[in-house]
């Protein structure tokens, strides 16, 4: 049993376990998902599972709300400012039709992707969603942009 190795992104925690580990309600986790802040893994039975990475993202969200007093809409705006089009090297022609490039109210992974690099991927597989799962990585990205 001690030989079981969990990968950082393996979705193994049911929503009830994730809620207990994070000391939040199941309703809170569902609300974060509805707002596009998190993307849970869903089995064919629609049962939600979370990974260590998801738990870190949720802890970052909770700290941002509780310590920095930033609202859910504020967090969505911060996520929407991540320049996914630059990170993914999207073509300029695609940017004209890209809701993530044109808008600033939702994270890029929450839009239905059409005619771009993430066209055939689920939100959970989004490079941006996975790469910027914790507060420090987002902060480092913004620092690097300002140089």
Image: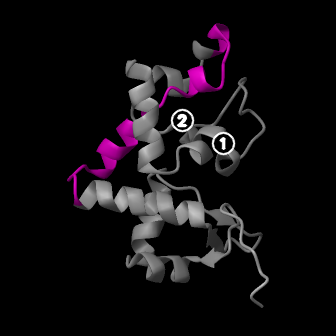
For this rendering, which residue is in front, 38 or 136? 136
Label placed on residue 108: 2
Measured along the vertical axis of the image, is residue 77 above or below residue 57?
above
Q: Are marks 1 and 2 in contact (CB under 8 Å)?
A: yes
Label placed on residue 72: none
Which circle, 1 or 2, is nearer the viewer? 1
- The residue singled out by tag 1 in the image is 126
Q: Is residue 43 left or right of residue 17?
A: right
Q: Is disc 2 surrounded by few (<14), some (14 to 19) or many (20+) residues within 10 Å?
A: many
Q: Secondary structure at mark 1?
A: loop
Measured along the vertical axis of the image, is residue 23 above or below residue 118?
below
Q: Disc 1 and disc 2: Cα gap in Å?
A: 9 Å
Identify the image's colour scheme: rainbow, by chain, secondary structure or one colour: one colour
Range of the magenta residues? 67-94
Residue at 48%, 43% in the rendered image? 137
Quarter of the view holding residue 140: top left
Residue 78 magenta: yes
User: Total marks drawn?
Assistant: 2
Quarter of the view holding residue 84: top right
State whether residue 101 appears in this view: yes
Q: Is disc 1 surrounded by few (<14), some (14 to 19) or many (20+) residues within 10 Å?
A: some
Measured along the vertical axis of the image, is residue 81 above or below residue 25?
above
Image spot of residue 77 (x, y percent): 36, 37
Q: Earlier in the sequence, mark 1 or mark 2?
A: 2
Q: Secondary structure at mark 2?
A: helix
Image spot of residue 107 (x, y percent): 48, 39
Measured along the vertical axis of the image, is residue 140 above or below residue 68?
above
Residue at 24%, 49% in the rendered image? 70
Residue at 62%, 77% in the rendered image? 13
Q: Quadrant of the C terminus?
A: top left
Q: Quadrant of the N terminus?
A: bottom right
Image spot of residue 116 (x, y percent): 71, 24
């Amino acid at each position: 049993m001690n030989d079981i190795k969990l990968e950082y992104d393996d979705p193994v925690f049911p929503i009830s376990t994730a809620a207990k580990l994070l000391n939040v309600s199941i309703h809170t986790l569902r609300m974060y998902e509805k707002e596009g802040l998190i993307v849970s893994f869903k089995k064919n039975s629609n049962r939600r599972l979370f990974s260590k990475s998801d738990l870190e993202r949720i802890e970052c969200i909770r700290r941002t709300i509780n310590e920095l007093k930033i609202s859910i809409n504020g967090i969505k705006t911060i996520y929407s400012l991540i320049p996914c089009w630059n990170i993914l090297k999207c073509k300029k022609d695609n940017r004209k039709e890209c809701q993530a490039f044109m808008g600033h109210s939702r994270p890029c992974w929450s839009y239905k992707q059409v005619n771009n690099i993430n066209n055939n991927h689920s939100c959970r597989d989004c490079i941006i969603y996975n790469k910027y799962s914790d507060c420090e990585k987002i902060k480092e990205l913004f620092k690097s942009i300002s140089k």
